[in-house]
Image: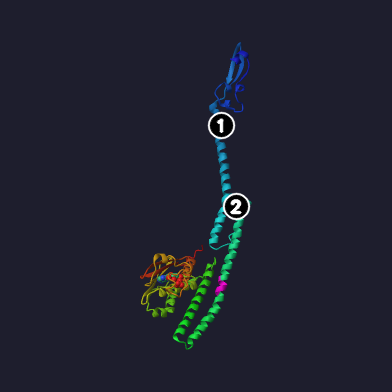
Amino acid sequence: MKVVEDKKIYHGMDNSPSPWMMMSHFSNQLDNTVGVPFTIGDEDYGLYLRPNNKLLFSDVHVIFAWFFVAVSIVSISGVIWFAKHLIQPITKLTEATKEITRENFNYPLNIHRRDEIGQLAESFSRMQVQLQHNDEARKSFINNVSHDFQSPLMNIQGYAELLKTQALDEEHLEYVDIIDQESKRLSNLTKQLLLLTSLDQKSYPMKLGVTRIDKQIKDTVRRHQWRMEEKEIEISYHLPPAPILADPELLMTVWDNLLTNAIKYNQNGGSIFIQISENDDNATVSFKDTGIGMNKEQASKIFERFYRVDAARKKDGTGLGLSIVKHIIELHNGKIEVESEIQIGTTFTIKLPKDKQTEE
Ligand SMILES: Nc1ncnc2c1ncn2[C@@H]1O[C@H](COP(=O)(O)OP(=O)(O)O)[C@@H](O)[C@H]1O
Ligand SMILES: [Mg+2]
């Protein structure tokens, strides 16, 4: 060996093909060996040293493990931060969209960014303002028109009444009757439109109070007694005392609408049955009639605005009654369902929570 013969220090790394790769550090051959010559007495010796790869690798493992942990922590927190940064404004926009469907156009976005999401938020805010403007214009239009309709209609009705007292022949009396009926219908329609637009407001001011719905229904029945007598409709009810927390005036509109429908769409000599049943949480009211009924498809549409099953068959109607009823029941966090069969009859079932007025 050169170390012993030439008495030179041998440095294996000098022979390494690519010092930059540093691969030879870990190899188990001459490249990784250092040789030192020395003499003891007259004898020449060589001392060869090579690192212990096993020890070296166990150290490297630990270093790699720490490195891996550090990289994971940094990248995970980076991803979380980035996702939050990206998702937060999108969540806000989604929330704002939901609010718009509830007719709340003031949901604050507070997104100030210069990127595409910033632009989207800016357009969204502009859209909110425009929608609010349109909504207010629509409501005030309906409001004004409905109000302005009332006074000329009152005049028409007044003069029609006056004409009826004159000595008119039968044909003319019929015409006056039609004028009277139609103006009453129009007046009813405008009143219902007014009520609907005020119910439409995102926070209708409900005047809650303990309401005896059994008494309300009995009062309603009394007020419509003459109509039922006219059609020889028999009415029966089971109305135990049922106090609930509700807006009495609004609920009165509900009973009124359901009873007039049960009379209007009933057969001559038919019957109506009204009942209240209760459990701990809810009061359930049902209006059952033996009237003309409707099929499933028709029944699924009756809560829509202006929908009437057969507009020609019954003239005095607006198609707004049941949509108002549904609106009111939903304001009370209740539910309304209908079951109907043609020529057999119809049952409306209303479930109202007794006192849990949970705000949405
Ligand atoms: N008890 C009922 N029996 C049969 N049909 C009904 C009954 N109640 C409602 N309807 C149908 O549903 C439609 C919508 O009712 P509503 O909104 O009260 O409007 P309106 O009574 O002004 O026509 C009515 O036109 C009628 O065709
Ligand atoms: Mg009606």
Of tags 1 and 2, which is closer to the observer?
2
Residue 117: give its label.
Answer: 2
Report the label total.
Answer: 2
Residue shown at the point (54%, 77%) measured from the top left: 150
**From what the image shows, is residue 347 above or below residue 46?**
below
Residue in the foreground of this view, choosing between 189 and 20:
189
Query: Toward which corner of the image does residue 57 lie, by quadrant?
Result: top right
- For label 1, the crowd category at 10 Å Cα-Cα, with few meaning under 14, some 14 to 19 and many 20 or more, is few
Which amino acid type corresponds to the residue marked 1 in the rendered image?
A: Val
- For label 2, the crowd category at 10 Å Cα-Cα, with few meaning under 14, some 14 to 19 and many 20 or more, is some
Q: Mark 1 or mark 2, which has the lower sequence index?
A: 1
Say whether residue 143 is magenta: yes
> Is residue 236 shown left or right of residue 119?
left
Which amino acid type corresponds to the residue marked 2 in the rendered image?
A: Ile
Residue most extreme to the top: 42
Look at mark 1 in the image and give the residue it sits on.
Answer: 60
Q: Quadrant of the N terminus?
A: top right
Residue in the foreground of this view, choosing between 302 and 21:
302
Dominant secondary-structure state across the stretch colored magenta: helix
Range of magenta residues: 142-146
Q: Please tell me in which quarter of the rendered image ligand 1 is found.
A: bottom left
Residue in the foreground of this view, choosing between 53 and 326:
326
Q: Secondary structure at mark 2?
A: helix
Residue 349 x/y as whole percent: 41, 68
